[in-house]
Image (cartoon, rainbow, N blue to C red):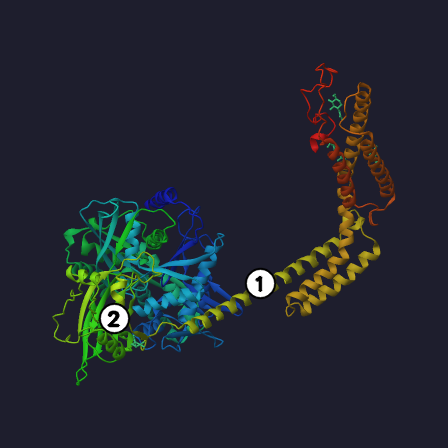
């Protein structure tokens, strides 16, 4: 498998180059698709790879479902649709950021059995069978939160995410995914267009020359088809002279309605027709039946990718009827014949947009599950030529891995290959405003035309005297039923600020508005100021003026409708982290000439969620999360009680030789028996309704009765070992005492200092005797105690006493040997008291000291 090899190579590569800085917060990359979610956790010490789900699969089905009090995810959730069609939610990506009245929503209604309702924000919400409504963002957030938990099972808290989005995602759709991420308790570090992410992954293991190489990333995805034309080149950093890989997106082509989902829809419609012709019943009236056919369509579609025909069999699909039919690849392709050319068109569009022709394209890299469909393959091959289709690219996971790699490079905590990307806008974005002339015409002026670079900003200058509004909109419709207006900027305080500037001596002051197109593809208003050059009368100011410090670089647009406005200062604000800190440039000069204006941004069409809405959504999710945790604890308590009861029942039924029988009295067994019977009855009658505390209490009561018996048994088991230990210490102590006393006597006779006094040794001996006496008494009583009585001496006390004796002994052994005084005469007193060895007593002397 070439894909696997590549993946291995990549793992190795990243492992070698990755290093840990002081505290690294793990980063999560997510490719949230219509059918599948793929994720990758980037964390030092973890191999760079996709995140496995709980069944060790490399991708997670993008579904969430509700089954009474349970919430299911992944395949479990999708499979629930055939039984609870209104409680299983899949393909939600199709609804992301879509207005309720848009074509995207009516299309979703064709392929899904979910009940769609309008949300309070004129987008979509979905309704469970019990009437509970969830906004699309909330349902997607649940899935993202599920992925977060999977990632966190690797032991690291996850907060930052990089997500892939289709390049044609509008601001509304981008807002929707960012909102979902926030509801899921995470923060979006960046959105990266998926074709660009694949390009990053592609570049990671390859080297390029300074001559650009052109490739097309083609993705026949579940929700849409898109082609991204990129160039790869080796470039030298002008400052550091270090080489880096530059990836530039030069053109994008896409088709929102040609998708894997639509192939599935057509297959399902074949099955619907077959069912009708066989049974003369309209299965579309039966939600469960439709949900089953939707799953079956996906299965048959997959079989037909490798076979020329497939048999479909669904038992009891609807109306108690079984269904069986055969579909050939040819029949399927006929039903999709109009799609064939549409699958190839985005490639041509991307080339046209980039102004390149096929001969200049080195390869076409296919990604997306449906790129393997024979019909799509054939369409691409005939469009670009088979030799141009890249092999050895792990198509399925390239986007999420590329996003992860790029995210890691942004965080600056990993050392990765230096790859820089330049992405571009997919739609024309213009600024619109009412002319100040009496006729109040609407004036449109392009601010970020299609193919504008991400990460750039522009300053618009308006010759206005009063407060006014500018709105940013898409020049043409972005998708059927989507609004064109993105946001409105209300600028106020104009008259006063201009008046002040004029007072300061500025001539013809203007209003300047800075707009930005972020690295994640969002357009926003950065700031608005009143500006008029105030002449600086100081010497420094005059010098500045001499050397061309003026601001006359404004480029007046040639468009006829711009008499009110000029654009200037187009520039790139390449920021590697989107957490932007406003740059304060030319501060001193600006102070006099610039007065900040109040900017109020209003979303009048499809607003992103407000902070309050997001908080409310997050609270709802937290509430079900904690409800689920409590439920799981209750279930655990129920199950442990049940298991405990059966264990106890078995123990009571054991033969007379079992430890339990030997260590228990008949009265105790009777008491347990009775309580056990009561509890089993209680569990049957009230167990399902009982709460966690009640369940735990029941177990506690029984354990209390069982505990003395268990304790006896445990004591009997432990006794020999503990006794052995006690004896070892009285034995060691006795040995030590004998030897030490002999030494003391000898030393006294020889008149050399001793390590111990005889009082010290007497003290230890007293301790030893006391220990021996206690132990002896205890052992005698122990022998006479029946097994089903509480033990005469506790092993706990035996251990403590042995420990006390041991410590006493150790204190003496560790005592420093006295310094041998050298007599002034220098004559050695006694050769035996070798001053060459003034050390501690040899502790290895078979006295057991080596155990100290
Ligand atoms: C204009 O000048 C007045 C008087 O100096 C001042 O109080 C006011 O804040 C200024 N307004 C602005 C917008 O700078
Ligand atoms: C006591 O300990 C010794 C040595 O540690 C061992 O040989 C002996 O078998 C032990 N006896 C019992 C009853 O555990
Ligand atoms: C230690 O104490 C036990 C219990 O009194 C006794 O049986 C044993 O002989 C003693 N061991 C020695 C070495 O004195
Ligand atoms: C007794 O004296 C000998 C010889 O000096 C020495 O090796 C040994 O450690 C001493 N024993 C004790 C318990 O002090």
- Left or right of 481, for residue 728: right
Asked if residue 745 is positioned above or below residue 767 in the image, the reply reads above
Q: Residue at x 32, y 57 (%)?
A: 369
Dot 2: within a 10 Å radius of its alpha carbon, few (fewer than 14), some, or many (20 or more) residues? some
| Residue 289 placement: quadrant | bottom left
| Percent x, y of residue 157 | 47, 56
Residue 632 is marked as 1
User: Relative to 409, does residue 527 appear above or below in the rendering?
Assistant: below
**Sequence-wise, which precedes: disc 1 or disc 2?**
2
Q: Can the viewer see residue 413 in this picture?
A: yes
Q: Could you tell whether 245 is left or right of 302 in the image?
A: left
Tell me which residue sits at (24%, 80%) in the image: 466
Instruction: Confirm or reject: label 1 Cβ below 8 Å from ligand 2.
Output: no
Q: Give percent across and percent down for residue 635.
A: 60, 63
As helix, strand or loop, the secondary structure at mark 1 comes to helix
Q: Quadrant of ligand 2?
A: top right
Q: Nearer the viewer, residue 421 or 32?
A: 421
Above or below — where is 27 with respect to 112? above
Please give the label number shown on residue 478: 2
Q: In the rendered view of the protein, which quadrant contains the C terminus?
A: top right
Classify 166 as above or below 212. Answer: below
**Cα distance between the residues tagged 1 and 2:** 46 Å
């Amino acid at each position: 498998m070439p894909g696997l090899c590549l993946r291995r190579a990549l793992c190795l590569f990243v492992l070698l180059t990755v290093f840990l800085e002081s505290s690294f917060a793990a980063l999560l990359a997510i490719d949230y698709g219509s059918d599948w979610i793929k994720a990758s956790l980037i964390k030092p010490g973890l191999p760079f790879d996709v995140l496995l789900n709980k069944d060790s699969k490399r991708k997670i089905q993008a579904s969430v479902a509700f089954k009474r009090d349970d919430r299911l995810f992944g395949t479990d959730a999708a499979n629930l649709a055939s039984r609870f069609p209104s409680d299983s939610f899949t393909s939600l990506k199709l609804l992301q950021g879509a207005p309720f009245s848009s074509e995207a929503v009516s299309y979703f209604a064709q392929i899904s059995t979910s009940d769609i309702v309008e949300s309070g924000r004129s987008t979509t919400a979905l309704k469970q069978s019990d009437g509970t409504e969830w906004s699309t963002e909330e349902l997607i957030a649940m899935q993202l939160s599920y992925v977060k938990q999977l990632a966190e099972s690797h032991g690291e808290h996850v907060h930052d995410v990089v997500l892939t989005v289709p390049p044609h995602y509008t601001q509304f759709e981008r807002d929707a995914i960012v909102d979902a991420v926030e509801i899921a308790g995470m923060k979006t570090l960046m959105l990266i267009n998926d074709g660009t992410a694949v390009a990053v992954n592609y570049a990671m293991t390859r080297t390029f020359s300074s001559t650009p190489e052109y490739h097309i990333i083609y993705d026949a995805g579940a929700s849409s088809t898109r082609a991204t034309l990129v160039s790869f080149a080796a470039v030298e950093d002008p400052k550091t002279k270090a080489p880096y890989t530059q990836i530039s997106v030069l053109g994008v082509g896409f088709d929102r309605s040609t998708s894997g989902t639509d192939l599935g829809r057509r297959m399902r419609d074949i099955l619907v027709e077959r069912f009708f012709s066989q049974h003369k019943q309209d299965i579309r009236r039966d939600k469960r039946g439709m949900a089953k056919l939707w799953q079956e369509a996906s299965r048959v579609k997959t079989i037909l990718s490798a076979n020329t025909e497939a048999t479909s069999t669904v038992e009891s699909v609807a109306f108690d009827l079984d269904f069986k039919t055969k579909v050939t690849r040819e029949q399927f392709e006929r039903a999709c014949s109009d799609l064939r050319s549409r699958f190839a068109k985005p490639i041509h569009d991307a080339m046209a947009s980039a102004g390149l022709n096929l001969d200049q394209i080195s390869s076409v890299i296919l990604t997306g599950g449906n790129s393997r469909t024979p019909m799509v393959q054939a369409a691409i091959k005939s469009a670009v030529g088979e030799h141009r289709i890249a092999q050895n690219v792990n198509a399925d996971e390239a986007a999420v891995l590329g996003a992860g790699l790029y995210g890691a490079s942004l965080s600056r905590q990993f050392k990765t290959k230096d790859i820089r990307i330049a992405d571009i806008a997919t739609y024309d974005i213009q600024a619109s405003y009412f002319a100040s002339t009496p006729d109040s015409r609407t004036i449109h002026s392009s601010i970020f035309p299609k193919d504008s670079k991400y990460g750039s900003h522009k300053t618009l200058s308006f010759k206005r005297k009063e407060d006014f509004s500018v709105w940013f909109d898409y020049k043409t419709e972005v998708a059927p039923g989507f609004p064109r207006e993105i946001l409105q900027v209300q600028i106020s305080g104009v008259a006063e600020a201009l008046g002040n500037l004029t007072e300061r001596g500025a001539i013809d002051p203007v209003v300047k508005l800075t707009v930005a197109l972020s690295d994640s593809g969002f357009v926003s208003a950065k700031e608005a100021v009143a500006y008029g050059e105030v002449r600086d009368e100081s010497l420094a100011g005059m010098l500045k003026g001499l050397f061309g410090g003026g601001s006359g670089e404004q480029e007046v647009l040639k468009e006829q409708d711009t008499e009110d406005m000029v654009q200037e200062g187009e520039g790139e604000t390449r920021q590697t982290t989107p957490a932007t800190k406003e740059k304060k440039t030319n501060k001193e000069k600006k102070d006099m000439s610039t007065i900040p204006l109040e900017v109020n941004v209003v979303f009048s069409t499809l607003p992103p969620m407000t902070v309050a809405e997001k908080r409310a959504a997050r609270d709802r999710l937290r509430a079900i999360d904690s409800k689920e945790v409590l439920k799981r604890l209750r279930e655990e308590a129920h199950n442990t009680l049940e298991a405990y009861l059966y264990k106890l029942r078995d123990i009571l039924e054991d033969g007379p030789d079992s430890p339990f029988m030997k260590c228990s009295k008949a009265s105790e067994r009777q008491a347990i028996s009775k309580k056990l019977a009561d509890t089993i009855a209680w569990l049957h009658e009230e167990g399902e309704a009982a709460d966690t505390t009640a369940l735990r209490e029941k177990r506690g009561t029984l354990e209390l009765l069982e505990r003395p018996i268990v304790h006896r048994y445990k004591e009997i088991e432990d006794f020999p070992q503990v006794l052995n230990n006690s004896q070892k210490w009285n034995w060691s102590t006795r040995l030590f005492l004998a030897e030490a006393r002999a030494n003391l006597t000898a030393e006294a006779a020889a008149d050399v200092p001793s390590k111990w006094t005889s009082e010290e040794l007497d003290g230890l001996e007293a301790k030893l005797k006391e220990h021996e006496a206690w132990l002896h008494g205890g052992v005698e009583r122990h022998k006479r105690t029946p097994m089903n009585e509480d033990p005469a001496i506790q092993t706990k006390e035996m251990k403590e006493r042995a420990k006390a004796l041991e410590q006493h002994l150790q204190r003496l052994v560790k005592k420093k040997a006295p310094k041998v005084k050298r007599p002034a005469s220098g004559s050695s007193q006694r050769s035996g008291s070798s001053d060459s060895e003034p050390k501690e007593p040899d502790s290895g002397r078979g006295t057991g000291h080596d155990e100290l």
